Image (tube, rainbow, N blue to C red):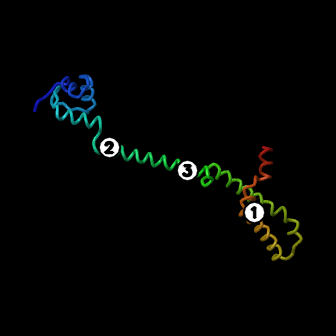
Amino acid sequence: MPLYTSKAVGEWLGITDRQVRNLRDQGVLSEVRPGVFDMKVCVRQYLKFKIGDKDDQARLVAARAEREETRGKIEKMRMEEAQGDLHRTEEVERALKTIFANFKNRLETIPTKYASTMAQLTDPAEAHDILQKAVQEALVELSDPEIALAAPEEESEDEQEK
């Protein structure tokens, strides 16, 4: 087993003597004894360092495949968004807030709207029917996207006053 100096190893590997010592210090190349290297071992270690082993290559291929898959998913999402099949979270949140604000306002108007009518009633069944009808109207409005997504009138006035 012939042994070589760092200068000879550098010549074989096409790198400088200093680079050989740096690779040794980094733990890439191993010495048989201080300043002396086994050429076969050094060539294998250097190749593994430069191009990696089979596991590194497999990980690289897998990472590239995953990156391409992710790019494909992003492109698909952009296309779906452009076609109107996909909506941004902010848009959905804004729509839901509008729907709930409208529904809340609608329910809050029921006592005011029917208070005088309720005060005059003596039959609980009739009061129940009137309130039931008012709640049903509010639920119908909630189920209609055109009405449910309309900007809340009372809330927008309150926001301007603040």
**If you read the primary sequence from the N terminus, does the residue marked by circle 2 or circle 1 appear first?**
2
Mark 3 touches mark 2? (CB < 8 Å): no
In the image shown, does 21 or 64 lie closer to the viewer?
64
Please report the residue visible at 77 percent of the width from the left and 71 percent of the height from the top.
132
Left or right placement of residue 65 versus residue 156 in this view = left
Numbered mark located on residue 57 in the image: 2
Q: Please tell me how crowded label 3 is: few (under 14), some (14-19), or many (20+) other residues with Cα within 10 Å.
A: some
Please report the residue visible at 81 percent of the width from the left and 60 percent of the height from the top.
109
Mark 1 touches mark 3? (CB < 8 Å): no
In the image shown, does 137 or 158 lie closer to the viewer?
137
In the image shown, does 151 or 50 lie closer to the viewer?
50
**If you read the primary sequence from the N terminus, does the residue marked by circle 3 or circle 2 appear first?**
2
- Disc 2 from disc 1: Cα separation: 60 Å
- Under circle 3, the secondary element is helix
Left or right placement of residue 3 versus residue 21 in this view = left
Left or right placement of residue 137 versus residue 12 in this view = right
Q: Quadrant of residue 44?
A: top left
Q: Please tell me how crowded label 2 is: few (under 14), some (14-19), or many (20+) other residues with Cα within 10 Å.
A: few
Q: Report the amino acid beneath label 2.
A: Gln
Q: Position of residue 150 (x, y in %)?
A: 75, 55
User: Mark 1 or mark 3: which is in front?
Assistant: 3
Q: Report the amino acid beneath label 3.
A: Met
- Under circle 1, the secondary element is helix
- Disc 1 from disc 3: Cα separation: 32 Å
Q: Quadrant of residue 108?
A: bottom right
Which residue, given by chain and number where applicable, does mark 3 sit on?
A: 77
Left or right placement of residue 42 versus residue 100 in this view = left
Which residue, given by chain and number where applicable, does mark 1 sit on?
A: 141
Q: Report the amino acid beneath label 1.
A: Glu
Whether 111 is drawn above or below 127: the answer is above
